[in-house]
Image (cartoon, rainbow, N blue to C red):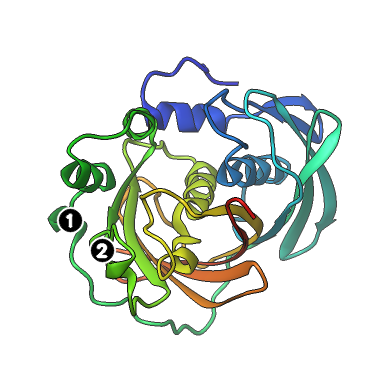
Amino acid sequence: MGDSRAANPVDRLVDLLDLERIDLNIFRGRSPDESLQRVFGGQVAGQALVAAGRTTDGERPVHSLHSYFLRPGTPGVPIVYQVERVRDGRSFTTRRVVAIQQGRIIFNLTASFHAPEPGFEHQVAMPDVPDPETLPTLFDEVRDHVGRLPAQLERMSRRHPFDLRYVERLRWTQEELKEVEPRSAVWMRAVGDLGEDPLVHVCALTYASDMTLLDAVRVPVEPLWGPRGFDMASLDHAMWFHRPFRADEWFLYQQESPIATGGRGLARGLIYDREGHLLVSVMQEGLFRRIGD
């Protein structure tokens, strides 16, 4: 494993994704002891995908993953990833991963890897949005609104591995949320060089994909970065990887929610590079319970 004392946020992220191999198909990942109620879901998904990828020959990039969050993980407690080598075919490789913490399964993932081959192409066009350089960082926008960052956000700003810049200004009151559509868009990139391993970039983006996707469900109901009225939890997460990319270069995460009902909200996202190439498609369902109910 890497040096867990890595000083900057990107080194910490790379270290987090550098699993310890304890047997042929068994890996162990760190879970930082942070002031969170549960382990961040993107961390578990990213680590599980690392475990799956490390049992392949590395010649076939991942093209899809489907996963379920079964129990909340406990911060500060290592997570063991057990990989099942389901299939090694001529074109496709399939892996199933179970994440275990303190003897209980907290997450499972199935990932499929595909040998590159030619084919016809089409895609949905990227929306016309401002360039990321013209937008404030998330933490600057919060700081400008409240005068200074609350202590928890100040710690987050120093440790966050991604630069986040919302395309539309954040809304801070219920009055501002009237007639807001259930969609959100944010530019992202890792705040430093992630190296040359393509699997690290894929797993880093998998980590990032869980950070803001459910914003699209919340945005018509409550301010994204104000006091929360709902307790949220990711239920599942699916991704389709269409093209190679670097997660330390700007990508646009366009997010929308087609429905929220029965205490659950569904969100879907499209991730583009700056040139407008569609890189990744994402789907996620989240649980939303009003705090105090």
Image point (69%, 37%), residue name: 73
Residue where numbered disc 2 is placed: 167
Residue 58 in the figure: left or right of residue 255: right
- Residue farthest to the left, as pictured: 134
Report the quarter where the N terminus lies: top right
Give the x, y percent position of residue 138.
28, 47
Q: Is residue 251 above or below residue 203?
A: below
- Residue 135 has which mark? 1
Amino acid marked by disc 1: Leu
The residue at 33%/70% (across/down) is 177
Secondary structure at numbered mark 2: loop
**Image quarter for residue 100?**
top right
- Separation of marks 2 and 1 at Cα, in angstroms: 7 Å
* Label 1: which secondary element: loop
Q: Is 24 placed left or right of 184 in the picture?
A: right
Q: Nearer the viewer, residue 190 or 138?
A: 138
Instruction: Name the residue rendered at 63%, 39% in the picture.
Output: 47
Look at the picture and state if 37 lies above or below 189.
Answer: above
Q: Find residue 229 and name its label.
A: none
Q: Position of residue 236 (x, y in %)?
A: 67, 59
Image quarter in which the C terminus is found: bottom right
Q: Amino acid at mark 2?
A: Val
Horizontal and vertical percent position of residue 137:
23, 47
Badge 2: residue crowd in 10 Å (few <14, some 14–19, many ≥20) = many
Left or right, residue 86 beside residue 222: right
Report crowding for label 1: few under 14, some 14 to 19, many 20 or more residues within 10 A (C-alpha). Answer: some
User: Which residue is depicted at the point 21% across and 41% down?
Assistant: 143
Residue 165, position in %: x, y? 27, 53
- Please tell me which residue lies in front, 82 or 102: 102
Give 282 or 211, whichever is nearer the viewer.
211
Work out whether residue 136 can be spotted.
Answer: yes
